[in-house]
Amino acid sequence: MEKLYGKDLTVLAYKARLLAVEAVHRASSGHPGGSLSCADALTALYFNEMNIDPANPQWSDRDRFVLSKGHCAPALYAVLALRGFFPVEDLQQLRSIKSHLSGHPDMRFVPGVDMSTGSLGQGLSTAVGMALSAKIEGKAYRTYAICGDGEVAEGQIWEAMMSAAKWELDNLCAFIDVNGLQIDGATKDVMPTEPLDQKLAAFNWHVIKIDGHDMEQILAALAEARTIKGKPTAILMHTVKGKGVSFMENQAGWHGKAPNAEEFAVAKQELEARIHELEEN
């Protein structure tokens, strides 16, 4: 598949948002807020950046991805389905007991998932292991991860940060989804983590700060990350939790709550309108 750019990526990101919200609504369970905030980064990774083959999900030389904030599986599943790893229709079975799409990604059952995640703080460590393995084996593949800004309060994240710097893992790129909210409220109130840029730089990471909803900035940051030698890269993407659905935006209450029928109708209308607007302009 040819790489996608600009508006084409943004349209796909909004289609992924719609599929994710629909799946959470149908399941009456899930995490829409953080799924919507990281949809742009996921779309850029799977439709432009990563060297992958949906027909061969276990290809040994593929780039790896770890969704460290595993509760945002609805967005990952939507992007994987759009990319062709499994049928889009499967999303209708999210969190069903008979489905392969559980509430958090499971590498045993979901094509395209490189690591099972859900226990916050652990995903970045596995990404470090993947990147280190590539170095040891002389492989060219790169490893990417997405962490939440609330997740950064976990101590294991900083152990992973130290390890990645020690081993000079310039083949590792971690997004941190800085939407400012987590399940219990504002991140700055629950456990302040700023200034993240200064802390990461002190851990010897190359730091890039971007608008996480601007595709050009996302692609430019990924391109810059590929040029960095001798240290890992952290992309601090400032985002809006619940992006694209007016009543979910910047509302901590939508961290882990499913929309009812009336709310989903509004969300669907807004997302479809945005998709139509982007496609027409």
Image (cartoon, rainbow, N blue to C red):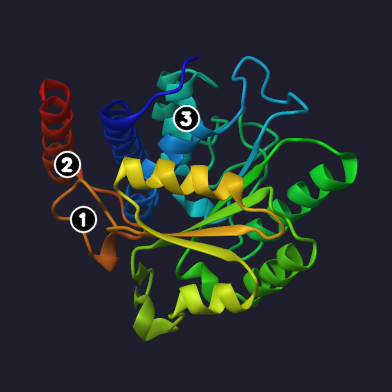
Q: Residue at x 71, y 36 (%)?
A: 141
The answer to whether marks 1 and 2 mark residues whose Cβ atoms lie closer than 8 Å is: yes
Residue 179: where, in percent of width, then height? 34, 64
Q: Which residue is more in the foreground, 24 or 98?
A: 24
Residue 49 can be seen, yes or no:
yes
Q: Earlier in the sequence, mark 3 or mark 2?
A: 3
Question: In what element is the residue under mark 3?
Answer: helix
Question: In what element is the residue under mark 1?
Answer: loop
Residue 261: where, in percent of width, then height? 17, 40
Local crowd size for mark 2, using a 10 Å CA cut-off: few (<14), some (14–19), many (≥20): many
Per the model, the C-alpha gap separating discs 3 and 2 is 27 Å
Q: Residue at x 67, y 41 (%)?
A: 142
The answer to which image quadrant residue 5 occupies is top left
Find disc 2 in the rendering and name its residue: 267
User: Nearer the viewer's eye, disc 3 or disc 2?
Assistant: 3
Q: Is 71 above or below relative to 191?
A: above
Q: Quadrant of the C terminus?
A: top left
Q: Which residue is more in the foreground, 15 or 176?
A: 176
Q: Which residue is more in the foreground, 225 or 106?
A: 225
Q: Earlier in the sequence, mark 1 or mark 2?
A: 1
Q: Is 173 situated left or right of 164 in this image?
A: left
The answer to which image quadrant residue 15 occupies is top left
Q: Which residue is more in the foreground, 213 or 201?
A: 201
The disc at residue 103 is none
Q: Residue at x 81, y 36 (%)?
A: 139
Kind of residue sitting beneath label 2: Ala
The disc at residue 248 is 1
Kind of residue sitting beneath label 3: Asn
Find disc 3 in the rendering and name its residue: 48
Q: Is 57 situated left or right of 72 in this image?
A: right
